[in-house]
Amino acid sequence: MSEAAGATAASVPSDSESALPPAPPPGAPLLEIKGLKKHFPLTQGVVFKRTVGHVRAVDGVDLTLRRGETLGLVGESGCGKSTVSKLLVALEKPTAGEILYKGRDVAKMGGRALKQYRREVQIIFQDPYASLNPRMTVGDIVAEGWSVHADIAPRKGRLQRTQELMDRVGLNPDFVNRYPHQFSGGQRQRIGIARALALQPEIIVCDEPVSALDVSVQAQVVNLLEDLQDDFGLSYLFIAHDLSVVRHISDRVAVMYLGSVVEEGTDAQVYGSPSHPYTQALLSSVPLHEPALRGQKDRILLQGDVPSPANPPSGCRFRTRCWKAQDICAVEPPALVDRGQGHPSACHFAEARTVVPVDVD
Ligand SMILES: Nc1ncnc2c1ncn2[C@@H]1O[C@H](COP(=O)(O)OP(=O)(O)O)[C@@H](O)[C@H]1O
Ligand code: SF4
Ligand SMILES: [Mg+2]
């Protein structure tokens, strides 16, 4: 008897547990993040722990990832990018806000729906070595997810399937019984990619996947991710601290500062006419490969460090480092809206400024 035919009124799954709908067409919203917050409690005391404050790691993030696109998420270290990625793959629970996947609230998913979400939204990490179990062979690492999602790969054909995946990500399938330490950094990242692909995901959250790799290897891994996107119609949230890496792969880019998004737009908008001072400063620090163009770059030196997210500045969080700050900036948090530049920017005094020559890669 089929599962559906066997279901009685009492056992009909609630909406939260029923399977997720099919993915929307390319270009339609697949994942929507609304007002997302994650505050970690700061505690004091050894025996009696008291909460003395909160680290506002993510403090009101809105983002939309459309099917088949790559959304770049950029910002300095400590601004909350990894926390966003952990919230997305349900490794952390939001303090507030919503994550909607295929129109369904992830926080309200249970049973089949949550299992399916965990399979369809995969993650690859910055440090592939730390995220791969050193005592497992590559074959076991790639196949691990099939123990939970057995329906994807029938037990009999798993070795062949694993080797096909290894081949697809550019690893020698004969090395299926080797251990992570026997591979280079770039190859280890390929193992992480194969592990994610094994679960036939819709989305891969890429948390600084190339930041720890040599520049030459970075390009190879980015090219591989692009090929896989074309072949499987994947959607990526691609996180980096460097705008130059994201530019290569992203359709749209969101710039994050101290827990929230300060500017968002297409690749051409954010690179060609950045309007938030923080984006302008980040772009100014991107190295240019063409010596002839270097003199044309607008140099902006960013003063100081990112303030503590446990005690962020009032009003605009960037004001302690901003050369344009006025009195209003200390009082009124600027909303992320279009102020006439054609794309949203969270600055009271947003104005487009060409920082790097437009045709630069
Ligand atoms: N589990 C945690 N407990 C307390 N603070 C945390 C935790 N995880 C991250 N943080 C803090 O949240 C802020 C953002 O961290 P993170 O998301 O890792 O930023 P990024 O990935 O942009 O470098 C940092 O100040 C970090 O110290
Ligand atoms: S709102 Fe004020 S402090 Fe913030 S980025 Fe704009 S000018 Fe600078
Ligand atoms: Mg991080």
Image (cartoon, rainbow, N blue to C red):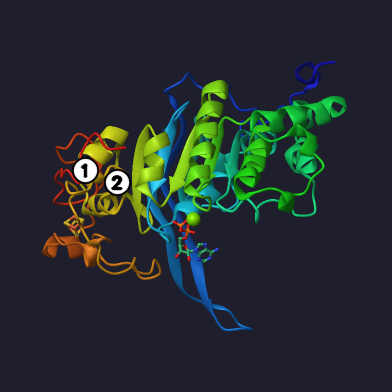
Residue 118 percent across, percent down from the top left:
64, 39
Label 1 sits on residue: 293
Q: Classify mark 1: residues with Cα within 10 Å, few (<14), some (14-19) or many (20+).
A: few
Q: Is residue 274 visible?
A: no
Q: Which residue is mark 2?
A: 288
Residue 115, placed above or below residue 42: above
Q: Would residue 178 appear left or right of 18 to someone viewing this image?
A: right
User: Residue at the spot x=62%, y=38% of the render?
Assistant: 193
- At a point 33% along the width and 68% down the height, the residue shown is 305
Q: Is mark 1 within 8 Å of ligand 2?
A: no
Q: Which percent across, then down, holds residue 11?
A: 76, 29
> Callout 2: helix, strand or loop?
loop
Tag 1 and tag 2, C-beta contact below 8 Å: yes
Percent x, y for residue 319? Answer: 22, 63
Residue at 42% x, 59% y is 77
Q: Is residue 191 above or below residue 298?
A: above
Residue toward you, 181 or 304: 181
Q: Could you say whether the residue bearing mark 1 is in a helix, strand or loop?
A: helix
Tell me the amino acid under the disc marked 2.
Answer: Leu
Q: Is residue 148 left or right of residue 252?
A: right
Residue 58 x, y percent position in the rendering? 43, 56
Ligand number 2: quarter of image: bottom left
**Viewer-closest of 129 and 275:** 129
If the image is split into quadrants, where does the N terminus sit? top right
Q: Residue furthest front?
A: 291
Residue 15 visible from this viewpoint: yes
- Mark 1 to mark 2 CA distance (whole Å): 7 Å
Q: Residue at x 14, y 45 (%)?
A: 351
Q: Amino acid at mark 1?
A: Leu
